[in-house]
Image (tube, helix red, strand yellow):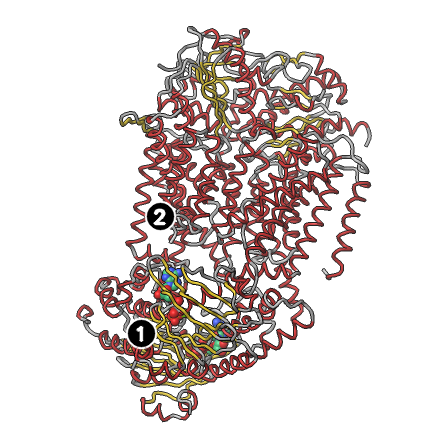
Amino acid sequence: WGPGARAADPIRVGFGMALTGGLAAAGKAALLAMEIWAQDTNDAGGLLGREVALVYYDDQSNPANVPGIYTKLLSIDQVDLVVSGYGTNLIAPAMPIMMSRDLVFMGLFGLAVNEQFDYDNYFQIMPAGPDPRLDWSRGFFSLAETLAPKPKTLAIVGADAEFSRNAMIGARAHAEAAALEIVYDRTYPPATVDYSPIVRAIQATKPNLVYVASYPPDSVGILRAAKEIGLKARMFGGGMVGLQYASIQTKLGPMLNGIVNYDFWVPEPTLNFPGINEFLAKYQAVAGDAGVDPLGYYLPPYAYSYVQVLGQAVEATQSLDHKILGAYIHGHEFDTVVGKVEFGANGEWARTRVLLVQFQGIEDKSLEQFTRPGSRVVLYPEEWVSGTLDYPYAE
Amino acid sequence: MAAKAFWPVAIALILAAIGLTQLLANEYYFFAAYVVLQFVVLATAWNILGGYTGYVNFGSAAFFAVGAYCSVALIKAFDAPLPVLILAAGAVSGLIGLATGYLTLRLKGVYFAIATLALAIVLETFITNWDFVGGASGTFVLRPKEVWLFDSYIKFLFAVMMVLAVAAVGIARSIERSKLGRGLAAIRDDEVAAECMGVPTLRLKLLATTISGTLMGVAGAPYPYYVTYLDPLSAFNLSYAVNAIAMPMIGGTMTWLGPVVGALLLGTAQQVATVTISSELNLLIVGVMLVGFVILAPEGIVGLVRKTIRRGRRR
Amino acid sequence: MFTFDLLANAIVAGVLLGGFYTAVSLGLTIAFGRLDVVNIAHPAFVILGSYTAYMVNAAFGVDPVLAGLAFTPAFFAIGVGIYRVYHASFERRGDESLRGLAFFFGLMFIVEVALILVYGVDYRLVDAPYIGATVSFGFVGVPMRMLVPFALALIMTIALQQYFVRTFMGRAIMAVSQDRLALQLMGADPTRVKQLAFGIALATASLAGAMLIVIGPVEPSMGRLYIGRVFAIVVLGGMGSVGGTLIAALLLGVIESLTATFYGPSWAPAVAFGFLLFALAVRPQGLFGR
Amino acid sequence: MNPPLLQIQDMTKRFGGFTALDQVTIEIARGARFGLIGPNGSGKTTLINCVSGVLAPDGGTIRFDGTDITTLKAHRRTRLGIARGFQIPKPFASMTVRENLAVPLEYAAGARIGPGIEDEVGEILAMVGLEEKAEANAAGLTQIEMRKLELARALAAKPVLLISDEAMAGLSSTEVDDILAILLILNERGITVIMIEHIMRAVMRFSERIAVLDAGRKIAEGTPEEILRDAGVERAYLGE
Amino acid sequence: MRAWKGPILASRLIIEEVEAGYGAVRVLHGVSMTIDNGETVVLLGTNGNGKSTLIKCIMGMVRPGAGTVVLETDGVGTDLVGKTPQQVVDLGIALVPEGRRLFPALTVEENLMLGAYRPAARRHLDANLAFCYDAFPVLAERHRQLAGSMSGGEQQMLAIARALMSEPEILIVDEPSVGLAPILVSRMIAKIKELKERRSLTVLMAEQNFNQAIKIADRGYIIVHGEIAFRGLEPEALRENELVKRYYLGA
Ligand SMILES: Nc1ncnc2c1ncn2[C@@H]1O[C@H](COP(=O)(O)OP(=O)(O)OP(=O)(O)O)[C@@H](O)[C@H]1O
Ligand SMILES: Nc1ncnc2c1ncn2[C@@H]1O[C@H](COP(=O)(O)OP(=O)(O)OP(=O)(O)O)[C@@H](O)[C@H]1O
Ligand SMILES: [Mg+2]
Ligand SMILES: [Mg+2]
């Protein structure tokens, strides 16, 4: 192997991704974004003058597959860089491997993974912020403070799963800080079919605020039940995964109006970062064939960005040495399609950018309206605000 | 395999496994082999109840998960060492096996299978709501930094699993050849007749559920260290229940060798598929393998091979 | 928190939910309860039903339930095809049920992958005028989204029940797993009887799938979530009793709904399956077994 | 005097609302040859099921060798020495004939595996005329052979009391004679035998005493001659 | 009782030179026999001589290696070889099989209903059911009991009644007396005779109980080791036969 031959080899980025099983919807969309990044990078001449290539395996949404996949990537495929699969459950099992080899590990949407491992070279692209559990719902509760009259009671409901339970912990902490009385605090199993009994029980406690931490199918179920039953609250929503997906938005249509929910990117003027529209255009051109979210506002830009950060670090340091890369990522700000990204000491975003958005003015079920500014206005954080809160959620 | 050769071969296997950890640097093989061996234990355990006794356990994942969560609890509470974890997990899962037996062994056939399924769901709900072991949000388990003799923890886990697999297979094999094995087979064939021939059916069935449960728990005990992050959804994953049934079925349920062959074959195929076919097609391969093998080798691979040999001899 | 209003609503919601469970379970009641075919892939076929309903709904705006109905012949044909393979590879050789289990596990994965390959992995939902609407009877609100599946499930149950007890073919289906030869001596062809019955079982999946996607979003691997519940209902219902299936499903629905309302939804599965265990301990042949 | 080997007292068994056994009392002496007859559905098999522990009676007691065994599990009774064959054969289908015999030999007779057990198996098989089928799979046997296997398995349990439930139904008269001869030899060796049979020729020749059940009640008991003369028995069972 | 049947069909069963067996084992060696319309023919033979095998050949359950089995209805012959059991049943031949083969988990009535599966029998379902309940009152009494929990004799009655439900021209009964109490054996035999007359049946009966069988038989065959040792004998001739004396009359 002469140096010439070596230089001609592509730089290989390895990861496991959920292409089947429960997380496949997200995993496949992420993969699409990453492929676009690889294409973009190669069109621009690659990294260090070499092509980049993605090496990935299906982790089947099953954590048990993760350790094997990453050791294979590192010790047999000899990839140069590694990034994570989608979600906390599939990031954590890879951590010890990264730690034992001192590798830079870019995470894709894991919540507070590093709290336990405290690993210096872990970076999380999800803009949760330095204190992920709390930052997650900061917007919801900050806004609640501003309502007049001030809300007194809170109902919390969420799925029996990793993300939602963590989000609920944060919500409880905020409630305590704001002296809100928690009148309902329950979880439900992921296999629940009908949510009306749950929503009715919430309704019976007459809460001012309803904080929901849910996954896509339950988000739809809870929302529909809330509409059918006529749930009354001043604010409703918060941590509902799935309402960000176009496929779900277009089926719920006007039912979404008034919901406040977290989000990471929406087509509001305040969030018009350089490159994002180009990226989305490329993504949307191929999303249909791949059978993933047609608009791709939620996860794909971040999936693009986490490899983008890595790529920029490699270019800037002209190195594939993970020590050097790690130090560089810690010390610098990155320009990505999701805006400027800066990582704190624990590898989370230095400042939170969990947006709180509200669905407004949804008239029908067309896809097009969700691409227009104003359909989801940003209410929090201050820096990105693009509209004002409509409340109460329902009379 | 000749009757006498088993234990020497078994010990040689363990020694070879330990030797391998010292020689082979590449960790990947140990990760993959760990999973395959874990399935050898699981499939063998299932077969003691399912194959020998004729009681189909749909809830293997629950026994496995109880073993894993037992470890988590002990690690959290006492930071207990691995041998203790294995023993404790075996004991707890064994007890649950015994309790399952008491609760459900009046049930026959499908009713028993469904009862184990129900039990698995009840257990999962309890773990989901037990915050000490992480509850639904899951829990992180950090591996010990160093282990004696091994230069990486996964090699150690691999060696441990090798010992467990050999032990499990050894247990299954001696059951099969003993009075107990014949009693279990009699239960499988006709329980009323077995009882009338002096076989203490309830006691033997309880023994079978306990041994089977113990071994499944043992298989799950090191798992938290393997994945380092455990949540109920993955610990109770359907794939354990599926594999525990499918592997003996593919290999053959009548002998101890069947589950071993099935686990090695299907387990390895799954590992290979995971890292070679980077798409949904790996699931398809598992599906097609399952369908293909049960159609083509109705008595399992072991049965097929035996039949072929017998036919060859006759000629 | 307990009010009469909540209780009434919880029971009604449970009954409606039970109706849906009935629809999902009926196919298995026939296949597993009547024919001894452990079709663990049935829930996967229900999801397939959801996707076909989705496809027609998305393309032509046809009502999903009508779409489900329209696809029953196709599902029937799939069922006949699967049964032929099953029969040729297992039944003719005897000792089918255990091996059949592995076969259907495999089939479940194959269906799942096929769905992913054709439709992708995104969540799918449908449009129908009754989704989101509610009818109220006093203080009891009944979501149409649940009521339509419930009514349909009731019709399916009655139709199947009548078919089994009133028609010669129906009775032959009840008898076929007990003694094939004897059935031949009655002048019926057991293979054709089973084939037909399995086709019917699978045809119900088309309807049940349509109901599922009316109730909520669907994704390819979702069927796995239903395996436990569906088998529990079939067994509780007494293996093969259509009426028993209905009652067992309603019971399970009401138990889940009551637990969710008054005790915490997280415990609903434990309570429901705990009840199943208890019921089996008291009556090992299921609540409505013979 | 020794107590009778088997004392069945006021045995009652109901299936739902239907009373299959109604206060049946029967005593069987040690070493006896006892015949149990009665019309179809009169409760003979049900009675045997209660004695062997397959069914739990709703009332009454069973004493064996002086001890109360009413609530004992079936396998315990077998170990005490009560062995039975089934009216509808229930072979261990996955085993060979030889292995079928090994189960009761190991579990009921307590014999150890070794050369001894092989001799036992051989002797029993020879006695019932199955020696050629020793290595055959039990599932492949014909009906008659299964009947013989049923008897052989009961013998392998080394019983004190042997209950034969219609072991001869469907056999030719020479075969009936063969089985009768086997039962007589066993009886000479001290085994008490209860025979349930509809073949009058066999029952009358074999039994020292006979009890007759009808609709769950015992309607007569006595020597074969007494039974033949009994008007009630003639009406209910023998006819003509 | 035959009011609904229209013209009475004359059915004959002609079996010629049938060879049959299981795998390598030959059981029947060139068996020939005829059963004429309206006759009651008894097939005698001790265990394992091939009675049931011959019946299985007629019913299409065993395919003869050679020979013919022909059903002649009003002079038109139908070859039964190669037909499936259900096709044979459709032609109007019903079998009460060895071991009864009821549907144990169905009720008595459901078993009877299934007997009328054959399209030709469905039309007269109610009348046939009434006939069976009239013939065997115990079945009416127990019509909701599961067949599997009936006693041996009750099951035998149900099996015969179920076969009658298919409204056969030819009824084949394989060992009706096995396992029956003596009183029931004679009653069962008498019943078959009665049914035969009420229904104008043609009956083929395999039986070991010579004394009973001979009471209703018009003719008898004796089968020994898969060959017909004596054919078409009248009852008196049978009684005088050496074989019969040796095997059945205990001489
Ligand atoms: N399924 C089978 N496979 C192999 N051999 C069989 C089978 N059925 C019967 N036989 C053999 O065929 C021969 C004739 O059997 P068949 O049942 O016809 O006799 P049978 O005269 O009806 O006797 P029985 O009075 O016992 O009913 C016997 O030797 C029997 O062992
Ligand atoms: N599990 C059951 N459920 C309901 N009824 C039953 C059950 N078992 C037996 N019976 C009924 O109990 C009665 C006695 O049956 P049993 O089998 O003891 O008769 P038997 O005397 O052995 O008759 P046979 O001589 O015909 O074998 C019969 O009427 C039968 O229908
Ligand atoms: Mg009996
Ligand atoms: Mg016969």
Q: CA distance from mark 2 to mark 1?
A: 35 Å
* Residue A56 sits above or below residue A313 on the image: below
Looking at mark 1, is its residue's CB closer than 8 Å to ligand 4? no
Q: Within 8 Å: ligand 2 and the Cβ of disc 2?
A: no
Q: Check the residue under mark 2 and report the chain it is in.
A: C
Q: Is residue A376 visible?
A: yes
Which subunit holds the residue at mark 1? E
Residues marked 2 and 1, same chain: no
Q: Position of residue A25 (x, y in %)?
A: 53, 30
Q: Quadrant of residue B159?
A: top right
Residue under pointer 2: C242
Closest to the observer, D8 or C278: D8
Other residues around mark 2 within 10 Å, as few (<14) / some (14–19) / many (≥20): many
Q: Secondary structure at mark 2?
A: helix
Please state the horizontal and vertical placement of residue E137, each as a whole percent of the image.
25, 67
The N terminus of chain E lies in which quarter of the figure? bottom left
Residue A112 image-quadrant placement? top right
In front: E63, or C254? Answer: C254
Query: In the depicted view, which residue is nearer to us: E151 or A118?
Result: E151
Q: Find out whether the residues at labels 2 and 1 contact each other: C-beta distance under 8 Å.
A: no
Residue C189 visible? The answer is: no
| Residue A324 falls left or right of residue E195 | right
Q: Please tell me whether mark 2 or mark 1 is closer to you in this view.
A: 2
The secondary structure type at the circle numbered 1 is strand
Q: Amino acid at mark 1?
A: Leu
The location of residue B273, given as percent across then percent down, is 63, 41
Q: Nearer the viewer, residue B50 or E16?
A: B50
Which residue is the site of mark 1? E171
Amino acid carrying label 2: it is: Val
Q: Quadrant of the C terminus of chain E?
A: bottom left
